[in-house]
Image (cartoon, grey):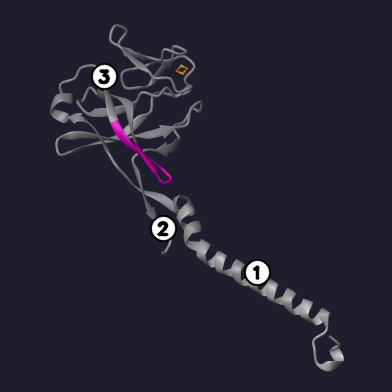
Amino acid sequence: MDSALGTPAPEVGATRRSYLGWLTALCTAAAGAVLSVPLVRFLIYPMQTQTTEVKWSDAGPVSELQSITDPVQRTIKVEQVDGWRKSVLDKVVYVTKAPGGQLSVLSAVCPHLGCSVQWSATKHTFVCPCHTAVFQTDGSRVSGPAPRGMDSLAAEVQNGRLMVRYQYFRQLVPTKEVIGQVGAARKETRNA
Ligand code: FES
């Protein structure tokens, strides 16, 4: 129709449709963005948290361990928290007794390249089977490529049981550096 008779020109109609199309797309995008906020927060939750609490693993009754003369191997159960996933892992540790009778706990992970250190009752030392690093009863380094002694773990007596806080340590460095711990419970640090 002729625009002179009051009917909108074709260009005006097309412009209006185009404008409505853009407006609809904009509203849809805005609604999508608003609705996606809870999903995004859910997905990034593990990155917004920090470790604030550590669970202890049971290494056995102190009454039994107090009678040891050589280091004894214990397999402890530790809970690993990795983002949303939780798993329970078996970890090998050694309980040793100092001359004064105090119990301590050593990680069996070799600080060289991570092999599992073994106690040799005949040699009365710890020996790593991979590259023959040797450690004393208290975990201190004797020889071999390990850059430091065996790593001690925090331990304490709770209700008559020796409880251990398992941790991972950096390998190939001369000083003990924690690089992670298992059994960590996470707690949100931001306001909800
Ligand atoms: S991994 Fe133990 S000595 Fe190399």
Image coords of residue 86 (percent x, y):
36, 41
Relative placement, left or right, of 153 versus 148 is: left
Q: Which percent across, then down, holds residue 61?
A: 16, 30
Query: What is the quadrant of the C terminus in the image?
Result: bottom left
Residue at 51% x, 65% y: name it: 35
Which residue is under mark 2? Answer: 189
Picture quadrant of residue 55? top left
Instruction: Left or right? Give the position of 78 relative to 129.
Output: left
Instruction: Report the Cα–Cα distance between label 1 and label 2.
Output: 36 Å
Q: Disc 1 versus disc 3: distance between alpha carbons?
A: 70 Å
Mark 2 is surrounded, within 10 Å at the Cα level, by few (under 14), some (14 to 19) or many (20 or more) other residues, namely few
At label 2, which amino acid type do we have?
Answer: Thr
Specify the quadrant of the image occupied by residue 5: bottom right
Q: Nearer the viewer, mark 2 or mark 3?
A: 2
Question: Closer to the N terminus: mark 1 or mark 3?
Answer: 1
- Based on the displayed image, in which of its 4 quarters is residue 161 positioned? top left
Q: Position of residue 21 (x, y in %)?
A: 69, 72
Q: Which mark is residue 71?
A: 3
- Image quarter of the N terminus: bottom right
Q: Main secondary structure of the magenta part?
A: strand
**Disc 1 target residue:** 25
- Range shown magenta: 77-87
Q: How many marks?
A: 3
